[in-house]
């Protein structure tokens, strides 16, 4: 081993921290196997490398890692052992479990970026960890943005004022990943993007030779990640690329030296680094779901025992002769006791939080029992609920249900008291598990909508201009008034976007504010997430809606859940711009809206019918801290609109439709490109005496918070939902909202209908588009048929 610069007390303290972390892993596994917790995954075997990484980590830095990093979190002071166990037990109290309030599986770490009132903390004054996600390698895309934000804060002078987010770009983003996850495409895309962007990231690969039961020979070409990554190494001192360090996981001095060098170069010179930590072990196997003895040979298990970094560090501590074996053993005994006490305190606090409510429920049930002919059965139910076992609220709610079922014919004040108490608790519990999906949800009343409507206004001689001109002027104003806004995507920079909405913006605001990217949708989205987590307001462009599928997993698993899975502790107000609907071709005119809204709960999904509406939606979104996907209409860029004189003030509320045309006979609901077709069909229907109310939903997530469509249905009593998604897609979602949530079924005089695209993708060419998607004629026929059913004499079928 190399000589080590740390003081003896530093080394001893590090060993003791690693030892406590190991005890937490061992006790945690026993807690799961005893039934007190549902699942356990731990960082045993990874302790020593994480101590070395923690010594290079500073306040303001960010971690984007995975579920082996408990020792690192302990070492930077972002996690206590009691909090670690509180998460294992799924304690929903933020004070006990501040990472997620019991929502995340154990060993999924996060720090809180927001104060209780929703304002940003000073991120430079604390260690930061982006909230972990389980899907393998999903922590890598956001690492791109977490690191790249430092470059922006350093190089853009107008950002220097935002001192709570960055100290002139000196922050390093530390990424951690297991060896097997490096087989994922997201890993390679992120490594490439970080290198291209010259972003200060230090990526650690914890290589223990396996991915659950699958060894490296089936995971990695040549079984050597260092060999594969060598092509990313910079060839000269000033060249682009990475510094690569390959260090055994048991060599603590070498690890400390590697991390000090890597972090220094990243911090001072923005040179990214990869630290490939080899010869690591996993003493308890992958997780509590199984034993690694099933797939590791006796020889491999013996090798792991010999290379376990913790006893190797212990040997080194003793070899320095700073203390004896007996003295070290005594300290280890203290540490075992401390960890056990932290675990017991976490369990008792969690247990008591549930038992208090069970005791109250038991008291109420007992009062009912004394007045009931089912007294014996009720008392037995109470005793069963209070029997020593796991403290589950579920057991209490199930018992209350059984009590109410037994006493259904025995109304009493005591029964009503139990129902009232249960309802209060149900609301409390539901909030603890379901709050903070977005800042606005469908459950909120209309006065909680985001912003009030500010309509476009026009000069008397307002010119008609192509839609792209409206957005171009809007984005110019937007970029000029807020330096935190950064936009990027394929072809966004130099040529100003394929539709010219950003034309001239790069020349005016510079290549860091308006940037081209490679064809890498997953890390375009991840780049935006990381930047937004650091206080910037990124607008990430995915060139076509069809290509959002590349990024959909990250949007769904990371972006959409971030606020929720941290119980309001972290946000990433990303705006994703894309375009879709009518164009030409299978992969340029798609409309997979139902797929999007099902996977993106937690993201606002907006579909402006024209570019004036799009500008108003962007204004609204920039006033919020919620992420959003805005789907612009492809054929709207060339369509002419009047140029508003208040582009910067227009506001389209999230969750509020717009009535485009009032009518008496049928309510037609649609959005996006279909709005014009609906209006054209409505004009034809008016010629035959049918009055159609045309409503542009505008916001698909959330959908019609004030219930305007239900109100329309009270007047017309007939409903048709039209869009370009597949049958049973977005129109079915809208129908469920209107008929079920808004009670629209009460007002129906006819069977509600949907009109959709075909089940296949849109075929190429104008005729392919015509026969693949709804058109004016089909809308006319569907609505006329509805009226024919009501009055065949007045509305005879003239086309059949």
Image (tube, rainbow, N blue to C red):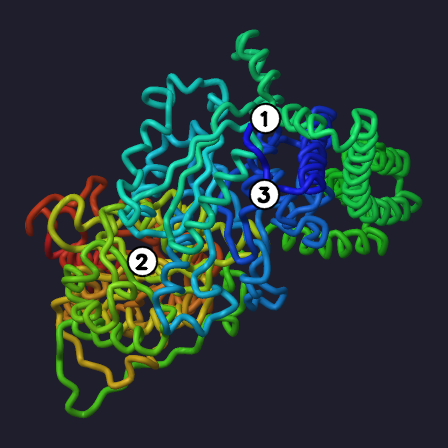
Q: CA distance from mark 2 to mark 3?
A: 27 Å
- Image point 65% across, 31% down: which residue? 38
Q: Residues within 10 Å of mark 1 (few under 14, many from 20)?
A: some
Residue 562 appears in the figure = yes
Find the residue positioned furthest to the bottom.
460
Residue that label 2 marks: 540
- Image point 44% across, 65% down: which residue? 168
Q: Mark on residue 104?
A: 3
Task: Check whether the beta carbons of the residues at disc 3 and disc 1 lie within 8 A of each other.
Answer: no
Callout 1 secondary element = loop
Residue 346: percent from the left, percent from the top? 77, 42
Within the image, what quadrant is residue 718 found in? bottom left
Q: Mark on residue 287?
A: 1
Frontmost residue, 520 versus 258: 258
Left or right of residue 601: residue 512: left
Q: CA distance from mark 2 to mark 1?
A: 37 Å
Residue 514: percent from the left, percent from the top? 26, 64
């Amino acid at each position: 081993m190399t000589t080590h610069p740390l003081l003896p007390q530093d080394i001893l303290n590090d060993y003791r921290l690693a030892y406590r972390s190991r005890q937490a892993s061992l006790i945690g596994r026993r807690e799961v196997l005893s039934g007190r917790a549902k699942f356990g995954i731990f960082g045993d075997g990874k302790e020593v490398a994480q101590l070395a990484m923690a010594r290079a980590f500073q306040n303001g830095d960010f971690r984007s890692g995975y579920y082996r990093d408990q020792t690192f979190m302990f070492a930077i002071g972002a996690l206590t052992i009691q909090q670690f166990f509180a998460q294992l037990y799924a304690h929903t109290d933020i004070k006990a479990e501040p990472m997620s309030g019991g929502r995340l599986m154990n060993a999924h770490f996060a720090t809180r970026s927001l104060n209780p009132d929703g304002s940003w903390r000073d991120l430079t004054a604390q260690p930061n960890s982006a909230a972990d996600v389980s899907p393998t390698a999903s922590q890598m895309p956001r690492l791109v943005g977490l690191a790249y934000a430092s470059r922006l804060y350093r190089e853009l002078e107008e950002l220097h004022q935002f001192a709570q987010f960055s100290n002139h770009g000196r922050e390093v983003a530390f990424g951690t990943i297991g060896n097997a996850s490096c087989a994922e495409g997201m890993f390679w895309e992120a490594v490439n993007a970080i290198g291209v962007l010259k972003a200060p990231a230090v990526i650690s690969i914890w290589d223990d030779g396996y991915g659950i039961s699958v060894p490296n020979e089936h995971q990695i070409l040549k079984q050597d990640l260092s060999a594969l990554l060598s092509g990313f190494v910079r060839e000269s001192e000033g060249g682009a690329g990475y510094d690569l360090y390959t260090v055994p996981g048991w060599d603590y001095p070498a690890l400390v030296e590697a991390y000090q060098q890597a972090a220094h170069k990243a911090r001072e010179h923005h040179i990214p680094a990869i630290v490939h930590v080899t010869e690591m072990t996993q003493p308890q196997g992958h997780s509590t779901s199984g034993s690694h003895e099933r797939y590791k040979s006796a020889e491999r298990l013996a090798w792991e025992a010999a290379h376990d970094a913790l006893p190797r560090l212990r040997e080194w501590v003793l070899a320095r002769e700073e203390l004896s074996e007996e003295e070290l053993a005594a300290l280890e005994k203290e540490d075992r006791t401390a960890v056990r006490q932290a675990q017991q305190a976490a369990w008792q606090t969690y247990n008591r939080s549930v038992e208090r409510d069970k005791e109250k429920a038991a008291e109420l049930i007992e009062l009912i029992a004394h007045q009931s002919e089912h007294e014996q059965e009720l008392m037995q139910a109470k005793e069963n609920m209070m029997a020593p076992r796991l403290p589950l609220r579920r057991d209490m709610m199930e018992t209350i249900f059984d009590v109410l079922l037994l006493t259904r014919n025995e109304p009493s004040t005591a029964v009503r008291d139990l129902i009232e108490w249960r309802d209060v608790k149900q609301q409390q519990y539901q909030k603890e598990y379901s709050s903070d999906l977005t800042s606005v949800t469908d459950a909120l009343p209309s006065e909680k909508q985001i912003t009030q409507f500010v309509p476009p206004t026009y000069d008397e001689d307002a010119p008609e201009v192509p839609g792209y001109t409206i957005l171009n002027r809007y984005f110019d104003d937007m970029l000029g008034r807020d330096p935190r806004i950064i936009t990027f995507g394929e072809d966004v920079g130099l040529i100003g976007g394929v539709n010219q909405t950003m034309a001239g913006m790069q020349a005016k605001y510079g290549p860091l504010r308006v940037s081209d990217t490679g064809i890498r949708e997953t890390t375009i989205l991840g780049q935006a997430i990381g930047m937004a987590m650091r206080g910037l307001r990124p607008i990430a462009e995915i060139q076509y809606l069809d290509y959002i599928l590349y990024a959909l997993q990250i949007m769904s698993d990371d972006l959409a859940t971030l606020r929720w899975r941290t119980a309001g502790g972290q946000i990433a107000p990303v705006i994703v711009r894309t375009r879709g609907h009518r164009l030409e071709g299978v992969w340029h005119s798609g409309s997979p809206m139902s797929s999007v809204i099902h996977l993106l709960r937690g993201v606002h999904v907006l579909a402006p019918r024209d570019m004036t509406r799009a500008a108003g939606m962007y204004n609204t979104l920039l006033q919020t801290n919620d992420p959003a996907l805005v789907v612009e209409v492809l054929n709207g860029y060339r369509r002419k609109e009047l140029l508003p004189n208040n582009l910067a003030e227009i506001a389209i509320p999230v969750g509020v439709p717009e009535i485009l045309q009032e009518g008496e006979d049928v309510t037609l609901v649609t959005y996006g490109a279909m709005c014009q077709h609906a209006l054209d069909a409505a004009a034809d229907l008016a010629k035959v005496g049918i009055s159609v109310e045309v409503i542009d939903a505008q916001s698909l997530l959330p959908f019609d918070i004030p219930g305007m469509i239900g109100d329309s249905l009270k007047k017309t009593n007939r409903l048709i939902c039209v869009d370009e998604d597949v049958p049973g897609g977005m129109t079915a979602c809208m129908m469920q909202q209107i008929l079920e949530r808004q009670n629209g079924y009460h007002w129906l005089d006819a069977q509600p209908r949907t009109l959709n695209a075909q089940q296949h993708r849109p075929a190429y060419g104008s005729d392919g588009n015509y026969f693949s998607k709804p058109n004016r004629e089909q809308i006319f026929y569907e609505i006329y048929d509805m009226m024919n059913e009501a009055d065949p004499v007045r509305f005879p079928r003239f086309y059949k």
